Image (cartoon, helix red, strand yellow):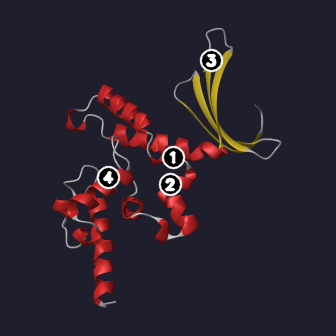
Amino acid sequence: MLGNVLMSESFSSSEKRHYFLDFKKTARDSKFIQISRSDQQSDGSYTRSFVIVFEQDFHFLVSAMSSLFHHSAHLGEKGKTVQDLYNEQVIIQERRGIPNWDPAKKPRERLFEHGTDVLTDGELLSVLIGSGTPGEDAVTLSNRMLKSLGGFSGLIGKDISTLSKFNGIGPAKAATIMAVMGIAKRLYLGRE
């Protein structure tokens, strides 16, 4: 697939191996990313392989790359091996987290389309925390937190150590929840 190149980046991992990342447009105005690898053979010829990802699937690519980099950054932490990380990825694929949901059912997209009133409490909290864990999507994690703590009112006044006891809630997500609950408390008490 040729396509018109809109933007291109390249790098070499050796004298004989080169990578190209091209953002292209088809004759029908569809956009896609083409990732190519070119290897020079001993006879001087080249073999090329490539992968194409179309615009409607960019969010899947970004989500997968984000997950890959996140997990690889923690490689070796807590005694995890490459096999452990692979197994976690299998779990993610089996659970088919929120990025794989029908867009009409995704909390953030529903919020954009219809506002906050159509979302359940768990969906609202999931938009706030952004992501779950490899074994639990953000909505399931949010519902578990709300059930355990007694709903939104149970979140008010909770500290980082209490919120961080939930797998998938680290200091940054705990701070976000605490800040929003602090805002809600001030609004409720009229201390704007």
Label 2 belongs to which residue? 106
| 50 or 150: nearer the viewer | 150
* Residue 119 location, quadrant: bottom left
- 1 or 3: tag closer to the N-terminus: 3
Q: x%, y% of residue 44?
A: 67, 13
Label 1 belongs to which residue? 101
Residue 76 to residue 156: above or below: above
Residue 6 to residue 126: above or below: above
Mark 1 residue element: loop
Q: Are marks 1 and 3 in contact (CB under 8 Å)?
A: no
| 67 or 185: nearer the viewer | 185
Few, some or many residues within 10 Å of mark 1 (<14, 14–19, 20+): few
Choose mark 3 or mark 2, whichever is in front: 2
The residue shown at (62%, 13%) is 41
Q: Are marks 4 and 3 in contact (CB under 8 Å)?
A: no
Q: Which mark is residue 141?
A: 4
Q: Are marks 1 and 2 in contact (CB under 8 Å)?
A: yes
Q: Would residue 51 be found to the left or right of residue 79 on screen? A: right
- 2 or 4: tag closer to the N-terminus: 2
* Residue 66 location, quadrant: top left
Q: Amino acid at mark 1?
A: Trp
Q: Are marks 3 and 2 in contact (CB under 8 Å)?
A: no
Q: Amino acid at mark 2?
A: Lys
Q: Amino acid at mark 3?
A: Gln
